[in-house]
Image (cartoon, helix red, strand yellow):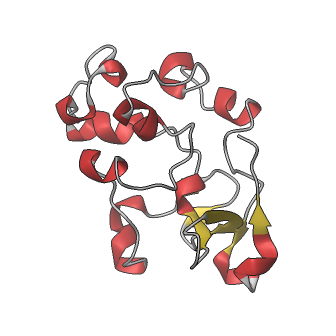
């Protein structure tokens, strides 16, 4: 593992190393939730149904390194893709940096603790159900209010 630069989270996304890119993720887990798209309007509705690999108590992937082997349609976010994906939360560090905005005060890179994100109500930890247990997605639509 290489050394990450001080304040790298303020750099443009294209300037980040792979390690810095991965560290920028706040770990909220919202990108790992199933979404429903209205065929007519294109509007995206969020659900509280998590990918089978998301640990619902920590909001972290159980096998991040090998996730594509188990979930082939899992998206690998890139700086270019972040600018095109409409469903990333407004609080997402990738989205914020793509819009040249600062990462939030609760982000663990600022606080040194992931607990601040949980206390701010950003994480989906303990608030979601696995797709293995959920049933129809239409019964699980939510508005996170974040």
> What residue is rendered at 70% in x and 66% in y?
47
Q: 40 or 62: which is nearer to us?
A: 40
Q: Is residue 59 left or right of residue 65?
A: right
- Quadrant where the N terminus sits is top left
> What residue is rendered at 35% in x and 54% in y?
84
* Relative vertical location of residue 12 with respect to residue 77 in this rendering, above or below: above
> What residue is rendered at 43% in x and 24% in y?
101
Position of residue 3 measured from the top left corner of the image (x, y, whole percent):
23, 24
Q: Is residue 96 left or right of residue 58?
A: left
Figure quadrant of residue 145:
top right
* Relative vertical location of residue 13 with respect to residue 58 in this rendering, above or below: above
> What residue is rendered at 45% in x and 32% in y?
96
Q: Is residue 27 left or right of residue 22?
A: right
Position of residue 8 measured from the top left corner of the image (x, y, whole percent):
30, 21
Figure quadrant of residue 105:
top right
Figure quadrant of residue 121:
top right
- Quadrant where the C terminus sits is top right
Position of residue 53 measured from the top left corner of the image (x, y, whole percent):
54, 69
> Which residue in the rendered view is the most extreme toward the front?
40
């Amino acid at each position: 593992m290489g050394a990450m630069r001080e304040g790298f989270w303020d750099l443009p996304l294209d300037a980040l190393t792979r390690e810095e890119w991965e560290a920028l993720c706040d770990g909220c887990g919202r990108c790992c939730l199933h979404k429903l798209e209205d065929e007519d309007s294109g509007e995206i509705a969020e659900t509280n149904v998590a990918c089978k690999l998301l640990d619902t108590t920590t909001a972290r992937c159980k096998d991040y390194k090998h996730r594509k082997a188990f979930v082939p349609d899992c998206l690998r976010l890139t700086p270019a893709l972040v600018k095109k994906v409409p469903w990333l939360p407004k609080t997402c560090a990738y989205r914020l940096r793509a819009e040249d905005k600062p990462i939030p005060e609760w982000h663990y890179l600022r606080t040194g603790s992931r607990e601040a994100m949980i206390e701010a109500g950003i994480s989906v930890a303990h608030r979601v159900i696995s797709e293995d247990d959920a049933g129809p997605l239409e019964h699980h639509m939510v508005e996170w209010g974040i």
